[in-house]
Amino acid sequence: MPGLDGLRALAVLAVIAYHLRIPGMEGGLVGVTIFFVLSGYLITDILLIQREQHGGFALRLFWIRRARRLLPAMLLMLALSSLWLIASDASRLLSLRDELLSGLVYMYNWQMIAQQVSYFESFGPPSPFGHIWSLAVEEQFYVVWPLALALLIRMVKRRGKLVLWLLGGAACSAMMMAMLYHPGEDPSRVYYGTDTRAFALLLGSALAVVWPSRRLSTRLDKRGSQVLDGIGIASLAVLLLFILRVGHYSPFLYRGGMFAAAVATAALTAVLAHPASRLGKLASGLKWIGVRSYGIYLYHYPIIVLTTPLAESQQFHLLRSLAQMTATLLLAELSYRFVEMPIRQGELASMVTQFRRRTGLVRLGKESVVAIVALVVLGACLAANSDNGQLLKVKAEAAETVSTAAADAIEPLASAEQIDSEATPTPEPAPVQTMAATAGASSQPSVVLQGDRITVIGDSVILGVVSHLEKRIPGIGIDGKIGRQLKQANAVVEQLKEDGRLGETVVIELGSNGAFTNKQLTALISAIGDDRRIMLINTRVPKEWQNTVNEMLSETAEASEGRVELVDWFAASEQEEGYFADDGVHLTRTGAEAYADMLMQSLLQ
């Protein structure tokens, strides 16, 4: 079915475009859904052919073939990536050790879910293994599905009922994705989960039951061929629309959109699998990429991650992307020619023997070669562990610094009970008086800032500005927390209200850690109340949600008719690289001074 190689090519190119941050390709992650549908179709088709020819499933042979197909290139990718890290930045291996091990046993996606690691949001260097979650989902399917299918066939004799069971399972999986997804929150749980992604695999499996490749006729009249190609073109158009228009934060994607993309993929798969499809013949022109799509998928992500500077990880760079793509195709070709195909066809042992005879090296069998690669990966894990002491020392020092900053930030908001317990009451901070900007009013104070009437609620960015704000506005109340998102601010506001510590002016500095919905922002403003001055500080963060956050804050301020004010940090920090640390978000001393000055001037207006 050469037409399916064209669909594989579309899937892997879409994923690469997404990871390269090519403008207009925000929906390239749909390529993974395409892979899942294809896998469900092809694996079920293979199993049904086995059953028809041998009267049952040759499970041992099936699993051995899957291992030969998938493991060698996977081990090679893990080994090469680990060696690169050992040579360039060995300390990173400590944080990646668990990922390496979970990748080896194809449980990477559940490891990420258990550790609550986001697929979409990361301030530190992204993991070069972040893409293997999808391979874990597929391998779990390969292990469980033959057993489940055998049981289903034994329970359900009729093909129609079997299809209904599969479609029912797909619907349950899609509904689980919709129910577990919460708009405005990170969607990584439903994106990673085998349970919430199984619908694509099951749709492909259902297609294999009703559209088995061995029964597709090469003869089809002109009218039938036109209908077939028409369905294929329409399905392709739907997928392209998803790739070009639907981003990974779109609620639609997780509430039916991804399921719709899987249905479109199943329809396109049916067309391209048919030998009489003209569209399938056209798609076969991408066969070279499709045949090597597994290797291309494996190697592209480590190459992109390990050769892209962290500060530019959210930007598209044409020349660098071309170089990364060239390296990916070259490595995929070498892997396909000298690793994947020889092992799949049982030729590796003879190749090693010939090499040994020519070089005089000791005998190495194919099992030894695979074992050596596996040992390299495990050695990388041990190397990561050897750096544990030094890196933990660094982490401890960093944690101490953050804890000190957090304590300083929270101190102005001490609880009412703590205040009452003091033997000597603390005098109220003196108001800050500022002079008018005009010469005519230069001798008279124009605005008085009283710190105890101002509350700032924010994340780690505001923690870095605490001391600078306290110098300018003594007594200002600051409640900052590392990693805080806007959806968590309501509870903070309610607690401060209950304690009688919410100021007459409330400043919200949130959005650096992720996007939020208009509903969540509106709820926060309502919780603060109509009787308070509300100020929203926008953000500068080298992440894809930056513009979404800033646009929503701006639109909310404009629609409030003066009730809500916007403090434009994004504009104030334009072209000011010296304001930011290496992550492009947190502030240097210069940046913190500028931030504090900006906020103070906004409060004075």
Image: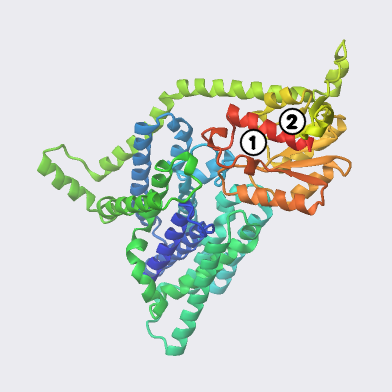
Q: 457 or 256, which is in the foreground?
A: 457
Identity of the amino acid at label 1?
Gly
Q: Residues within 10 Å of mark 1 (few under 14, many from 20)?
A: some
Most extreme residue toward the front is 440
Residue position marked by numbered label 2 in the rendering: 479
Query: Viewed as shown, does residue 452 lie left or right of 205?
Result: right
Q: Is residue 519 visible?
A: no
Q: Residues within 10 Å of mark 2 (few under 14, many from 20)?
A: many
At 42% across and 73% down in the image, what residue appears?
A: 273
Q: 149 or 327, which is in the foreground?
A: 327
Query: Viewed as shown, does residue 296 lie left or right of 412?
Result: left
Q: 550 or 121, which is in the foreground?
A: 550
Circle 1 SS class:
loop
Identity of the amino acid at label 2?
Asp
At 46% across and 30% down in the image, what residue appears?
A: 94
Query: Viewed as shown, does residue 48 lie left or right of 426?
Result: left
Q: Which mark is residue 139?
A: none
- Residue 393 drawn at (x, y percent): 50, 20
Q: How is the image coloured?
A: rainbow
Residue position marked by numbered label 1 in the rendering: 483
Q: Is residue 224 visible?
A: yes
Vertical relation: 143 (above or below) 362: below
Vertical relation: 104 (above or below) 3: above
Most extreme residue toward the bottom is 222
- Residue 403 drawn at (x, y percent): 64, 23
- Residue 105 drawn at (x, y percent): 44, 42
Mark 2 vs mark 1, CA separation in Å: 13 Å
At 77% across and 41% down in the image, what residue appears?
A: 535
Quadrant of the drawing holding the C terminus = top right
- Residue 89 drawn at (x, y percent): 40, 31
Query: Viewed as shown, does residue 593 lie left or right of 363?
Result: right
Circle 2 SS class:
strand
